[in-house]
Amino acid sequence: MDDAPLATLLEDARRHVWVCGPGLTEVEVEDALPALVDSGRTVLADAGALTACAGQPARLRGVSVITPHTGEFARVFGAVGCNPPEQVRHAAGETGAVVVLKGASTLIAAPDGRLAINTHATAALGTAGSGDTLSGVIAALLAAGMPAWEAACAGVWLHGEAGQQAGPWPVAEGLDRYLGLARQKAEQMQG
């Protein structure tokens, strides 16, 4: 059923959280992103969705979470400049979405001005495909009912912990094997 037309997939109310962008061309995003936002679904935009919105941040309004790396951020919003926290806050306010600027220190900004800086990670997460894993982790937390701000913050931490558990230079496709250990550590820290 996953290869059915998007309009058909949107008829299923259980499909309430969507990741739009990874693996999609700009043309595919042109059709999918507005349909997802108009459907009232919770949408996380990454990769191809950000490329398709280059220089047009208003096209991301209605999205819940945006997960750019610095290059994608610059294409959509302009260069991060000398005050990244302020730029990320501005992007969150402009789009109404939680913005996760991936990097050595990941910045997470909410539209209401909240800002978190996550340093709990490893440089090894800069490998191709690792951002797609992060998008999936955040989307899973959204699907479990976590609000966007909390899902983004928790997802970034869990992703970083999985990277640390995986050891030096993990393959992005293998990070999922360490997400359970990351969750266990988070639960131990809570208890």
Image: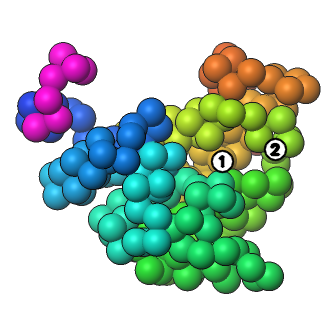
User: At 74% from the left edge and 79% from the top edge, which residue is drawn?
Assistant: 81
Q: Amino acid at mark 1?
A: Val
Q: Amino acid at mark 2?
A: Ala
Residue 72 drawn at (x, y percent)? 59, 58
Task: Give percent across and percent down for residue 36.
Answer: 23, 49
Point out the stretch of residues depicted in magenta: 1-7
149 or 71: nearer the eye? 71
The quadrant where residue 170 appears: top right
Q: What is the number of the mark on residue 64?
A: none
The residue indicated by pointer 1 is 156
Based on the picture, tell me whether residue 5 belongs to the magenta stretch.
yes
Q: Under tag 1, what secondary structure?
A: helix
Tell me whether the residue at label 1 lies in contact with that at label 2, contact meaning CB atoms closer than 8 angstroms.
yes
When asked about the image quadrant of residue 191, the answer is: top right
Instruction: Verify whether residue 63 appears in magenta.
Output: no
Q: Residue at 17% across / 35% down in the picture?
A: 6
**In the picture shown, does residue 22 fall above or below 46?**
above
Q: Identify the residue under disc 2.
A: 121
Rendered view: 68 above or below 93: above
Instruction: Tell me which residue sits at (22%, 48%) in the image.
Output: 31
Residue 149 visible here: yes
Q: Is residue 35 left or right of residue 124?
A: left
The quadrant of the image that shows the N terminus is top left
